Each structure stands twice: as structure tokens, then as C-alpha cells.
Image (cartoon, grey):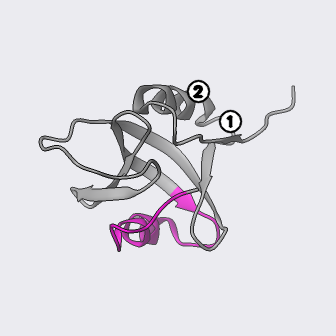
Amino acid sequence: FPVTITGINWLLSAENISRLIRASSRPFEGAFALWKDGKKCVIWRARLYENPTPFSAVPRQIILRCDGMPVVACGVGSLLLEECEIENVAPAATQTLLSRSLRNRLV
């Protein structure tokens, strides 16, 4: 059967997005978002992130780094992106690129 890549709607809850990522992960083609320059960012693994302090952010905004990994605000809650790939970017450089600025947003 044909497999289609699933785009992420960041207005959903972190729990629903986490389920989508798990369901779309390997051996399938992954859930994706677009990076600021229009490149596809495939998210292979993510987990719910409990922020110890309140924060104000728009869904899809990278709000902080935890152990070098980006945390993204969702409609309700946030997700720690454990494994991602941005097209035409070396896998080792992806986490650094995503975490470089807290103002970055995935689309």
C-alpha cells in the first residue's frame, strides 16, 4: 500500500502529535514539519516534555533546549524532539541547527 508522509499540525496537543510521530516513524516515511527555509524536517522520535515553569509561546516555536535537544510548543503542552532530520543537512548538525535560536519556528 502507498505510504504518505504526514504533516504535523502544531495546534494539536503534544500527546496527539507524539502519537502521530510514533505512528509515522520507521519503517514509514515519518511525520514532518517545514523548517524556516522551506526544507522538510522529518521527526522520527519525540516525547512529551513537562516544563517545570510556565512559558508563553506560540505553537511550533522552539521554546528551549534540553540536553541539546529542541523543545517545541504545541497547542497544549510541548514536545522534546529526540531524533530529526532536515533535508540536505547532516544528521549530526540537525539538532544544533534546530536549537540555535529560541525564536525559530517549525511550520
Q: Total of numbered circles in the picture?
A: 2
Give coordinates of residue 86: x percent, y percent.
Answer: 57, 64
Residue 102 in the magenta stretch? The answer is yes
Residue 87 in the magenta stretch? The answer is yes
Secondary structure under badge 2?
A: helix
Q: Identify the residue at horizontal 68%, vertical 36% (top origin).
A: 28
Where is 55 relative to 97, above or below? Answer: above
| Residues in magenta, as a range | 85-106
Q: State the residue position of label 1.
A: 28
Where is 55 relative to 17, above or below? Answer: below
Q: Between 20 and 14, which is closer to the camera in this rendering?
A: 14
Farthest residue, direction left = 52
Q: Between 40 and 58, which is closer to the camera in this rendering?
A: 58
Give coordinates of residue 69: x percent, y percent.
Answer: 31, 56
Give coordinates of residue 104: x percent, y percent.
Answer: 43, 67
On the image, which quarter does residue 64 sit in? bottom left
Q: State the residue position of label 2.
A: 23
Where is 35 relative to 11, above or below? Answer: below
Q: Identify the residue at horizontal 26%, vertical 61% (top origin).
A: 68
Distance, label 1 to label 2, CA atoms, is 8 Å
Q: Residues within 10 Å of mark 1 (few under 14, many from 20)?
A: some
The amino acid pointed to by label 1 is: Phe
Side of 103 where 84 appears, left or right: right
On the image, which quarter does residue 102 sit in? bottom left
Q: Identify the residue at horizontal 12%, vertical 40% (top origin).
A: 52
Q: Earlier in the sequence, mark 1 or mark 2?
A: 2
Side of 15 where 24 appears, left or right: right
The amino acid pointed to by label 2 is: Ala
Marks 1,2: beta carbons within 8 A: yes
Please state which of the two labelled residues, at mark 1 or mark 2, is closer to the viewer.
Answer: 2
Secondary structure under badge 1?
A: loop
Rendered image: mark on residue 3: none
